[in-house]
Image: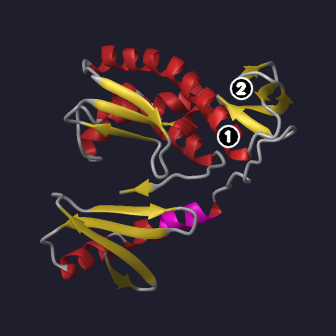
């Protein structure tokens, strides 16, 4: 990895076996990274960065202003979210396998005595994973019918930098586990976004036209999703 300076911004440069340049701005401080083809010279990469300087500054400001979740301890009385609704966590000790019960305004986390914070988090994360896996198939099926495309495989995993990804060759999409905490229409936005990549690889004019066709309100949904308190997301050009 090398670095270049553009004005007062230091940019990490990673060169690898790819065809195109990728520019990313990472939370929480707005760290900037460019992934570039192995044989591309640093002068060419610097010119690309200069051309995107306004874009970089805009998203650095947005990231630094964005509200962030407080660290969770997984104890009774904490706020946790599911499909955009706030629930109070109620931790109940019992001598049986761990489980989560969803009530009107509480999530009951049943654990064995003296269970660590990390294990409590893992149990709740697994509950979120199952709920998102219950929700996603219907959204994917609806999009397949509208878009006339086929998703061969999909899954849910923790991702530090994206709400979703799409492997175009394998026709496989991944959804960020954190989406289970967001409103259903925000989940739909991410599903549509990733599935549109099966029709258009790049975020170009055609991609935008397809988004406008399949989810006309996608811009508002994207803004709504990015207004929620976050622990990890990325702006990528």
Residues rendered magenta in the picture = 58-64
The tag on residue 98 is 2
CA distance separating discs 2 and 1: 10 Å
Residue 2 found in image quarter: bottom left
Q: Position of residue 229 (x, y in %)?
A: 66, 48
Q: Is residue 219 left or right of residue 204?
A: right
Seen from the viewer's position, the closer of residues 69 and 113 is 113
Report the magenta stretch's main SS: helix
Quadrant including the C terminus: bottom left
Residue 151 found in image quarter: top left
Packing grade of label 1 (10 A; few <14, some 14-19, many >=20) is few
Q: Secondary structure at mark 2?
A: loop
Can residue 217 be seen from the camera position used here?
no
- Which residue is drawn at the image coordinates 16% and 68% (left, top)? 38
Quadrant including the N terminus: bottom left
Residue 208 found in image quarter: top left
Q: Is residue 110 above or below residue 232?
A: above
Report if residue 69 lies within the magenta region.
no
Q: Position of residue 37 (x, y in %)?
A: 17, 65
- Which residue is drawn at the image coordinates 32% and 37% (left, top)? 166
The tag on residue 226 is none
Q: Is residue 107 above or below residue 166?
A: above
Asked if the residue under mark 1 is in contact with the one under mark 2, i.e. CB atoms within 8 Å, the reply is yes
- Which residue is drawn at the image coordinates 21% and 80% (left, top)? 42
Write down the residue under mark 1.
Answer: 119
Packing grade of label 2 (10 A; few <14, some 14-19, many >=20) is some
């Amino acid at each position: 990895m090398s670095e270049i300076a553009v004005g007062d911004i230091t940019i990490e440069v990673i060169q690898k076996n790819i065809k195109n340049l990728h520019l990313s701005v990472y939370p929480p401080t707005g760290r900037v990274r460019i992934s570039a083809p192995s044989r591309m010279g640093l002068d060419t990469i610097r010119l690309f960065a200069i051309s995107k300087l306004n874009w970089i500054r805009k998203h650095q400001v947005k990231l630094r202003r964005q509200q962030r979740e407080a660290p969770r301890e997984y104890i009774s009385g904490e706020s946790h979210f599911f499909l955009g609704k706030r629930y109070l966590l109620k931790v109940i000790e019992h001598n049986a396998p761990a489980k989560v019960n969803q009530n009107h305004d509480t999530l009951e986390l049943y654990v064995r005595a003296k269970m660590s914070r990390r294990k409590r988090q893992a149990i709740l994360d697994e509950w979120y994973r199952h709920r998102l896996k219950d929700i996603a198939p219907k959204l994917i099926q609806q999009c397949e019918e509208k878009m006339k495309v086929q998703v061969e495989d999909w899954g849910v995993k923790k991702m530090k930098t994206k709400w979703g990804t799409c492997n175009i060759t394998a026709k496989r999409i991944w959804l960020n586990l954190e989406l289970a905490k967001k409103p259903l229409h925000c989940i739909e936005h991410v599903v549509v976004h990733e599935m549109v990549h099966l029709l258009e690889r790049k975020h170009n004019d055609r991609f935008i036209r397809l988004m406008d066709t399949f989810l006309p309100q996608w811009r508002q949904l994207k803004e709504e999703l990015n207004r929620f308190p976050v622990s990890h997301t990325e702006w990528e050009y």
